[in-house]
Image: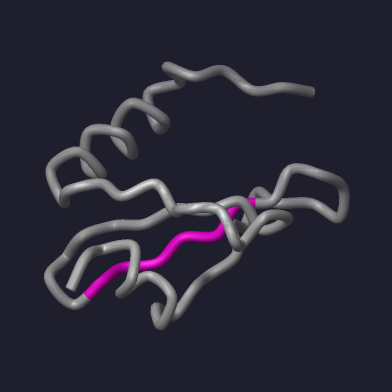
Amino acid sequence: MTAQREAAGARWHVSSYSNSGNNCLEHGRLADGTQIVRDTKDRARAALVLTPGAWRGFVDAARAGAFGREG
């Protein structure tokens, strides 16, 4: 089964940084540790699928401020 097919049945969590506007992301984790991210407004689109290592790198970079913040 592909990660995209498994994502359809994943337990999703809305980002704590999402707001009531247009900036909403959801995150889920598959049984094998694969991390998935999708746009709350367009759930029919494919989710972004990240290996556990790629997810750790993304989170570490975000915590270090690599992406900045839109205000």
Kindly report the secondary structure that dominates the magenta region of the rendered protein: strand
Number of marks present in the image shown: 0
The relative height of residue 7 versus residue 67 in the rendered view (above or below) is below
Q: Position of residue 48 (x, y in %)?
A: 39, 46
Residue drawn at point x = 25 percent, y = 46 percent: 50
Taking the spot 40% from the left edge, 32% from the top edge, the residue there is 63
Please say if 49 is above or below 31: above
Give how far across and how far down residue 69 sits, in percent: 64, 23
At 41% from the left and 82% from the top, the residue drawn is: 9
Residue drawn at x 30%, y 74% as measured from the top left? 6
For the C terminus, the image quarter is top right
Q: Is residue 24 left or right of residue 55?
A: right
How are the residues colored? one colour
Instruction: Report which quarter residue 66 is drawn in.
Output: top left
Position of residue 24 measured from the top left corner of the image (x, y, whole percent): 69, 51
- Please state the extent of the stretch shown in magenta in the rendering: 25-30
- The front one of 57 and 63 is 57
| Residue in front for this viewpoint, 52 or 9 | 9
Which quadrant of the structure image shows residue 28?
Answer: bottom left
Q: Nearer the viewer, residue 1 or 65?
A: 1
Specify whether 53 is left or right of 20.
Answer: left
Seen in the picture, residue 23 relative to 43 is either above or below; the reply is above
11 relative to 61, above or below: below
Q: Is residue 23 left or right of residue 27?
A: right
Q: Is residue 11 magenta?
A: no
Q: Quadrant of residue 42?
A: bottom right
Quadrant the N terminus occupies:
bottom left
- Most extreme residue toward the right is 21
Residue nearest the observer in this picture, 21 or 63 = 21
